[in-house]
Image: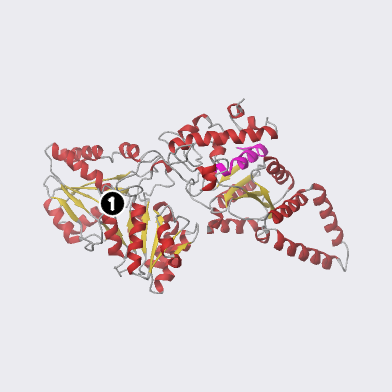
């Protein structure tokens, strides 16, 4: 009998015995593996959090009680248990379930998430809001050990520890190594700490010592000091207790009975902020994911039997791989080059650099703001720091870019990966805003390559530039190149490249949007229109002389970009036209609409917003017809 088929909500889960829950865990893993092997997703983290999700929903009364999942990489079991079992096969597909918790998708998703380290702060807001409104429900934030490395998580913990509100933080720890002896002792101490009789006796003794006039304070101080010393030696949670949270653990995060015992005790017997420390294994239940959790953290479609990724190899490697290989080449001849990433050495392509130059590579953890300020310090010592971050995560370091790098015109190269649409990961991960917020920074040099070879040349150019911060934005996946060239060439600073000369209008584009713009021009030429086609290369600054000449020769200008239209490249061209053009210029701006784009394949998303080749061609035709 398949028990999971009978679970349409956590209410159904609570009808099962604790023994039956182990079978439910196995069936959830089968459901996950089937769906993710077909369409990809964040597999290893969610496999490791199955028992946590089961125990939490067994003990708490969601959605009245609020479960806040950090990032969302751990939340697949939560989705399956909360009425989305049958729809789980659609996860990350167009029109299907999001790969992350979304408040608009289910009332069981207390907060929409996608970036790390936010759950404690958001959960604390929910808890304080509950208190202000006089409500009585529970709030639990579930955060992984990786997310806990983010500064925002510690800001949340610091604030939580200073308040007396009832809130629980569950630390899903799949990295900490605890020996069997220490683990067994800690589990024994955890059982003692959660024993109701122990807590009753401890409270009575504490009250009794307070009644002794001369000796009470000294006895309490002595007991407290001994307790602190013992905890520092044998309990890894003393840090959290120093922050003001009561600590429980470590607990086996795959032992459902033990988890339920702890959560029931915490829910019914504790007052104030609490942290439950659960030890789990990433990829639990699937041998390939347990062996290589990094590979299966976020993965495309793969074979269940062999674990082999099914994506087809391309003639040209992905941009991130091209970036990593080029940086290794450049660093061999330039010992001042250092590389920095924020917990993304594989995703950004820097693993090879780390192996070649370990003393010049820095993975700072989930700490983008720190990464940028750290780079500023390195630049001040005369080094050439290269900071590799995804566009969506670069948003988190905007203040440091302005305050610590741009203000003093420090020579830091930012390689902005995943710029533009990133497909199935959806709105929290699309890199649709970077051109807009970076354009506002005085002195910023922003480039966007139309192919992998141009990325190599832009890196070469940027590392010889000494005018301040440089940003190179490039998309996820591979470029349109047929093969990679050898060596590097200098890109003429600020100068666009005229690819075709025409007359009907001028189509100006940069970055990965150029490919569809070029295809749109092919379509138009077949229909008798021959636009001028320009590869802008530079988003900022713009070559006023080049564009003044372009405006004078064309009555209509079309810009195509992989950024939101609000404040993007098209806006920059329109602003420049007001300044340098001697006569009015008709400008059509094509880019992302002023909204958060949903998840789905890149092709489907681009078609839906009219940014595929056919959509661009039609927009240009309609524009010229007017």
Task: Estimate the x, y position of residue 55 in percent, counting from the top left.
Answer: 65, 40
Residue 233 x, y percent position in the rendering: 71, 63
- When the figure is inspected, residue 191 is found, relative to residue 7, above or below; the finding is below
Is 436 a magenta residue?
no
Q: Residue at x 14, y 40 (%)?
A: 525
Nearest the viewer among 274 and 137 is 274
Extent of the magenta region: 46-62
Q: Is residue 426 above or below residue 224?
A: above
Quadrant housing residue 236: bottom right
| Image quarter in which the N terminus is found | top right
Which quarter of the rendering shows the C terminus?
A: top left
| Residue 114 pos. (x, y %) | 48, 47
Decide if residue 568 is on the left or right side of residue 212: left
Q: What is the crowding at mark 1: few (fewer than 14 residues within 10 Å), some, or many (at least 20)?
A: many
Residue 564 in sight here: no
Depth check: 14 or 291 in front?
A: 291
Badge 1 is on which residue? 511
The secondary structure type at the circle numbered 1 is: loop
């Amino acid at each position: 009998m398949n028990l999971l088929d009978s679970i349409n909500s956590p209410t159904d889960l609570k009808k099962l015995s604790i023994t039956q829950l182990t079978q439910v865990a196995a069936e959830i893993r089968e459901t996950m593996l089937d769906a993710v092997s077909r369409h990809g997703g964040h597999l290893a983290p969610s496999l490791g959090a199955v028992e946590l999700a089961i125990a939490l929903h067994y003990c708490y009364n969601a959605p009245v009680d609020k479960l806040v999942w950090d990032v969302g990489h751990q939340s697949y079991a939560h989705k399956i248990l909360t009425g989305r079992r049958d729809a789980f096969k659609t996860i990350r597909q167009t029109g299907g379930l999001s790969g992350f918790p979304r408040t608009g998708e289910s009332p069981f998703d207390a907060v929409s998430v996608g970036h790390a380290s936010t759950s404690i702060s958001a959960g604390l807001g929910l808890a304080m809001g509950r208190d202000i409104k006089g409500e009585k429900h529970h709030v639990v934030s579930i955060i992984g050990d990786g997310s806990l490395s983010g500064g925002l998580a510690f800001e949340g913990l610091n604030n939580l520890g200073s308040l007396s509100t009832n809130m629980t933080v569950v630390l899903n720890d799949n990295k900490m190594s605890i020996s069997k002896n220490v683990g067994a002792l800690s589990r024994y101490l955890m059982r003692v700490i959660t024993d109701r009789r122990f807590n009753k006796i401890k409270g009575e003794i504490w009250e009794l010592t307070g009644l002794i006039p001369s000796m009470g304070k000294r006895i309490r101080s002595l007991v407290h000091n001994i307790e602190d010393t013992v905890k520092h030696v044998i309990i890894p949670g003393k840090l959290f207790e120093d922050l003001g949270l009561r600590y429980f653990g470590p607990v086996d995060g795959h032992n459902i009975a033990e988890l339920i015992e702890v959560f029931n005790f915490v829910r019914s017997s504790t007052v104030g902020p609490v942290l439950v420390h659960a030890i789990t294994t990433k990829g639990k239940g699937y041998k390939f994911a347990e062996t290589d959790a990094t590979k299966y953290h976020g993965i495309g479609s793969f074979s269940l039997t062999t674990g082999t990724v099914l994506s087809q190899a391309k003639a040209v490697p992905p941009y991130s791989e091209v970036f990593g290989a080029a940086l290794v080449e450049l660093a061999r001849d330039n010992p001042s080059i250092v590389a920095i990433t924020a917990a993304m050495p594989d995703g950004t392509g820097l693993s090879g650099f780390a192996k070649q130059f370990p003393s010049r590579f820095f993975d700072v953890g989930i700490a983008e703001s720190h990464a940028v300020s750290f780079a500023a310090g390195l630049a001040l010592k005369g080094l050439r720091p290269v900071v590799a971050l995804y566009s969506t995560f670069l948003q988190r370091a905007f203040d440091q870019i302005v305050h610590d790098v741009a203000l003093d015109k420090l020579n830091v190269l930012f390689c902005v990966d995943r710029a533009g649409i990133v497909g199935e990961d959806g709105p929290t991960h699309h890199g649709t805003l970077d051109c807009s917020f970076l354009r506002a920074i005085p002195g910023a040099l922003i480039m966007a390559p139309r192919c992998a070879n141009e990325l190599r040349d832009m890196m070469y150019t940027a590392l010889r530039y000494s005018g301040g911060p440089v940003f190179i934005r490039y998309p996820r996946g591979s470029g349109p190149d047929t093969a990679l060239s050898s060596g590097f060439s200098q890109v003429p600073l600020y100068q666009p490249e005229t690819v075709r000369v025409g007359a009907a209008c001028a189509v100006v584009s940069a970055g990965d949007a150029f490919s569809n713009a070029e295809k749109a021009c092919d379509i138009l030429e077949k229909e008798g229109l021959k636009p001028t086609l320009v590869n802008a290369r530079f988003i900022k600054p713009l070559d006023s002389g080049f564009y003044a000449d372009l405006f004078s020769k064309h009555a209509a200008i079309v810009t195509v970009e992989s950024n939101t239209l609000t404040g993007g490249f098209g806006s920059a061209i329109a602003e420049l036209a007001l300044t340098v053009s001697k006569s009015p210029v008709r400008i059509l701006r094509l880019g992302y609409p002023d909204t958060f784009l949903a998840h789905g394949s890149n092709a489907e998303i681009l078609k839906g917003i009219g940014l595929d080749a056919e959509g661009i061609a039609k927009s240009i035709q309609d524009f010229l017809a007017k």
